[in-house]
Image (cartoon, grey):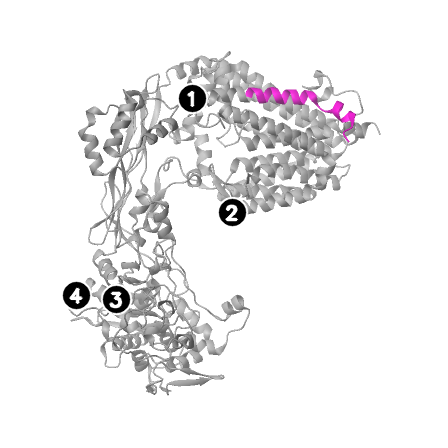
Amino acid sequence: MIDRRMVSSFDWLLLVLVLALGACGVLNLYSAASSFAATGTPVYVKQAYWLGLGLVVMLAVAMVGPQRLSTIAYPFYVLVVIMLVAVLFWGKVIGGSQRWLALGPLVIQPSELARLAVVLVLAAHFQRRDQAEPYRLHQLLVPVGLALIPALLILKEPDLGTCLLVLMVAGSVILLNGIRLRDLAIAGGGLVLVLPLVWRFMKDYQKRRIFSFLDPESDPLGSAYHLIQSKIAVGSGQFTGKGFLAGTQSQLHFLPEQHTDFAFSVLAEEWGFIGGVVVLSLVAAIVYRGLATAYRTKDRQGLLMVVGGTAMIFWPAVINVGMVLGLFPVVGIPLPFISYGGSSLITTMAALGLIQGVAMRRFIFHRP
Amino acid sequence: MNLSQVPKPASVGGRGLEPGENPHIRRSLLTAAVVVGLAFVVLLGRLWFLQLLKGEHFRLLSETNRIRLVDLPPSRGLIFDAKGRLLADNRPAFTLAVIPEDVADWATLTRRLNNLVGLKPGEVDKARWAAQGQPPFKPVVLRTHLDRHQLALLETFRYELPGVKVLVRYQRAYLAPKLAAHVIGYLGEINKRELEVSNRAVYRMGDWVGRYGLEKSRERMLHGRRGARQVEVDAVGREIKLLQEVPASRGADLTLSINLDLQKAAAKALEGRVGAVAALDPRTGQVLCLYSSPTFDPNDFITGMSVEQWKALSEDPLHPLKDRAVSGMYPPGSTYKIVTAAAGLAEKAINLTTRFFCAGQMPFGRRYYRCWAYKKGGHGHTDIHKAIRESCDVFFYKTGLKLGVDRLAKWARAFGLGRPTGISLPHESPGLVPDSKWKKKRFKEPWQDGETLSLAIGQSFTLVTPLQMARMTAVVANGGLLVTPTLVKTVTPPGGSAVPAPEPVTARVAIAPEHIETIAKGLSAVVNEPHGTARRARLPGITVAGKTGTAQVVGLKFEKSFGDEENVPWKYRSHALFVAYAPVENPSIAVGVVVEHGGHGGSEAAPVAAAVMRAYFGLPEPQPKQPPKPKPGTAAPSAPARKPARPGANP
């Protein structure tokens, strides 16, 4: 039975923020894809459908709740890892690389599920090893391993962006447990030593992307051109923007991937600084809402789930906007709610479901 | 839940601060809040910088942003044979397109195009529908691969077809399609996965890349480097002015060591049969001929195949797409006796004077192992020379027994068997050299000595490719060098002169010159002495050396159950093998031939090798008619009139 207190504890403000941001995304997609070939359902309509479906997923995850989720954390994690292995062998090649797995009529992208699985399994892991004092380095070996397995499998697909996201989300969850500064320094030092090794294992095209970021002139036909066009789009929006459907950069197709990875530049061009600030503030508000919920959560498991869910929104948002604004190299990471993409929207909504699920049950710990 | 909670977690008030029970988590959360805050401040700062501080600058740029990049794809390198004959060319292909904004009347245009090139009205509508939303000055493709007749018609009625445009793009054309299909291979359109991992400066959507053969393995050289043109466009995107151009640089041309004359000879000799020929220069390893039958037309992959065409090709029971010359694996049969002889001599299991008595069979374990000359009563006293010449099984059984499986395997590897030869073809097979370890791993059973007997005459698990056979023979021909087969003789970069391909690695086989000499004399006797098994490989004026082989496909008993040889169904007949080199005095060509289910190496495979060598030495074709060939698949082929001596094993 649904406890009435669960309804009243539901984070309605978070829902409102999410709906507002989702609406911004749909509206922006109407413009971003308006000059494309009009075959099939328009992109913005599809995004609205996905948003609706995402809300259902969010509610479902929230209703299941942290306790039941934690019981399936390990089996779910193992399943996802198996799927990630399977995708390397039998995966369908769609949209760039081998990321999709066809299970009968259903086509799923295990790498999207991986973030969720890693958050759940890490929460369960730390719950079982709950301790008052900070964790030592050797105690973090297992959690780091749990994060690395799916991350490396995703890197193999190859999907550098999603791999990075898994690592960042997992890193956020692990670090949040509190680690002694000295241990942190040792870990950081180790990482610096490992980096040259990583570089050796990187594919040529991945190195090239980093080079072209550091020196845009080196690849004037490639990503640097896109980066420059994106910066022109954003900058030319100025304070109030060029107006809805009036962005010259986007409507004349100077922008690459303008309905997915570069959707934010369309928004910034047409709505200007005001639009950019509104969207960034909405994202920031959602993130802070998550942190606030985490702050009020008593058990480590619920807290880590909330932190993981929050990180799943924070990191892609920061990386995507940073890339569009020319702060980071071009990596294919969509901006939650603004970029078009069903699977990323569903994953984001599931992350929100984690936060809501914990928020709803707050009273259970507060008023015995 | 009040709004004041949103921006700052510190203001979460009211009820007890639960994480407070763990100060570490509490501190981490606060750190996280600060990090998040900083991140958004940086992003907002950047937004402020781009839009407010530099906004005017970018607004100006966007208003004058009329500069577009136009892609200039490179043209692919050409491929020539050893004599400079063009094998792979780029030929213009014509595409019918229409520029929507120039069309005056769609109904008339549709009708005319229907009359001229048979374009259905529905096709025009479909193409227009698909191109909806793209600028009206961009061509919409209506049909690809126009033929000459259609082209002429379109040209004739050009002025009555406003808006119609014929676009030219270059596509690959294979000029000797049925002669070198497997070696050269074919192209396919690049897929998304390949695009993702490739350099954008090299590959774009719609590019063609090598999918098979040299087109695939030499993709890097052949593809070339694309260029780009910076053009100024007007407000709707029409090109006005060329600003800057980086021209495309075409791919390098390849000259192969493959000789088309030899390919032709091989194709003719193997016509209607299933098999392969590999021939190389034993001095350098340059491959002179590499042919696999049946073959296919690589041009079909360029112009596109219908579903039925593709099905017919890919489901053909004879597998025409398979390159038997480098990826077909066959039991070597008696051609393997070269290895056994070399191993025996080098390991001192036998010497030049060793004689074994062949009574037509040899008892071992609980059974008798027959020599193919069983019916004739055996070979009697046999030394190494006679054993090679007459392919005496008993001699090699005994040699093999003395050596044991692992020493035989070691020498098979020394002759290049059991691993890829290193030829630059992506589809090469390694073959198989069994040893006791392998058997243990594969079958969980120890090696049986009886199996060594079969192994010594090339009948056990050993598998070789025709190219490996030719390379193995080359070791005898060149006096003990294991060459690496190469296909590309010279590479000609765009605008440059031909550069010889780097010399491949050559290994010396650790075998004494007099031992090689002995084997070489034996191989010469196979062709040239009275009792030799391959007298059909003789050439006028040139001394050939060789070794026949017959590899059973099914057990001897099963084969015999059909009674007469002619009654054995095609698929159960033995493979015919032959290796050869010539001229004996100073060898310049080594050949390996397999005719699948051909019967006997001496009668079926040797003439194929002879035909290729004849083409190599520029000798005229012989007059006498070819013996009738059994057609693959026919149950009862026209039987050869001769009645060959049926071997106990394999000559």
Mark 4 crowdedness (10 Å alpha carbons): few <14, some 14-19, many ≥20:
few
Instruction: Identify the residue position indicated by label 1 in the image.
Output: A35
Mark 2 crowdedness (10 Å alpha carbons): few <14, some 14-19, many ≥20:
some
Instruction: Identify the residue position indicated by label 2 in the image.
Output: A90
Whether tag 3 and tag 4 are in contact, CB under 8 A, the answer is no
Kind of residue at badge 2:
Trp
Whether tag 2 and tag 3 are in contact, CB under 8 A, the answer is no
Instruction: Identify the residue position indicated by label 3 in the image.
Output: B608
Task: Tell me whether marks 3 and 4 sit on the same chain.
Answer: yes
Part of the protein shown in magenta? A1-24
Q: Earlier in the sequence, mark 1 or mark 2?
A: 1
Q: Main secondary structure of the magenta part?
A: helix
Residue B239, placed above or below residue A64: above
* Whole-number angstrom distance, CA of label 1 to CA of label 4: 68 Å
* Whole-number angstrom distance, CA of label 2 to CA of label 3: 43 Å
Instruction: Identify the residue position indicated by label 4 in the image.
Output: B621
* Whole-number angstrom distance, CA of label 3 to CA of label 1: 64 Å
**Callout count:** 4
Task: Tell me whether marks 1 and 2 sit on the same chain.
Answer: yes
Q: Chain of mark 3?
A: B
